[in-house]
Amino acid sequence: MRLGIAHHFGWAVAVTAESDHKVVDRRRVELIEPGLPTAPIHHEGGPHLFHRLAAPLDDDALAVLVADVRASVVRATSAALDELAAGLSEPIVSMSLRAWPADFPRDIATQRRVPYESRADSVMYCQVLAELARDRGWAVRLYTAKDVEAEAVRILGERAKEVLHGPRAVWGAPWSKDHRAALAATIVAT
C-alpha cells in the first residue's frame, strides 16, 4: 500500500492506494491536538502582527510554543497514522509528501522572517510526517504539488481520467483536488 498526503495546517487528506492505483482508503486526518495554534510561526512571527493587539512573542518564547506545537503534532499524527495503518489489509510501504527545501532554516529567528515565515509551519508538518513514516519503516517520497497530477497523467496515459477521477464514483464526495493530488503522489512514487 502507498499512502499519499495532501496536508494543510493541522489536518491532511490521506489517500491509500494499492500498487494498481486502486484507492482502498481515503480520509481526513488530524495532525494536531485541539487547543494549540496550527501555524505558530506564521501567526506569531509573521509580518501581519500589526493587526494583533498583543505584543509578539520573542524568539525564546516562540521557540517554546513551536516545541509544544511540534510535540502535539507528533502525538496526533502518530495516532492518526496508527489508526489508518490498522484499518488496512496490507502494510503501507511508502508515504508521499509535498517537498520542502532541504536547506530550510531551523532557527526560529530566521523562520519568523519573510520569506520563511509563510512556509515554516508547513515544513514542520512535512518533517514530522516524514520522521513518523521512517519510524514505521515506510519509504518517504516527496512530490511537487503543482506538478504531481500532471506527472501522474503522463505515467498513466489513457487510464489517467479513470484512475484519478474514478474514485469519486466509488467513494462519493468529497473527492477534491487534494484527494487527486494525494493519489497522484502514490502513482508518482512507484
Image (spheres, rainbow, N blue to C red):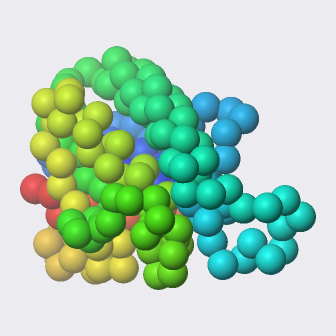
Residue 17, picture quadrant: top left
Horizontal side of 67 relative to 19 (left or right) equals right
Residue 66 lies, in percent from the top left, at 52, 46
Q: Is residue 40 visible?
A: yes
Residue 63 lies, in percent from the top left, at 51, 48
Q: Is residue 143 visible?
A: no
In the figure, 133 relative to 114: above or below?
A: above
The quarter in which the C terminus is drawn is: bottom left
Residue 95, picture quadrant: top left
Which residue is found at the position 84% from the left and 74% from the top? 51
Near-viewer residue (137 or 53): 53
Near-viewer residue (124 or 82): 124
Which residue is found at the position 32% from the left and 50% from the top? 127
Which residue is found at the position 18% from the left and 55% from the top? 141
Residue 153 lies, in percent from the top left, at 24, 75
Residue 13 lies, in percent from the top left, at 48, 49
The quarter in which the N terminus is drawn is: top left
Horizontal side of 147 relative to 166 (left or right) equals left
Horizontal side of 21 relative to 181 (left or right) equals left
Horizontal side of 59 relative to 15 (left or right) equals right
- Residue, far top: 86
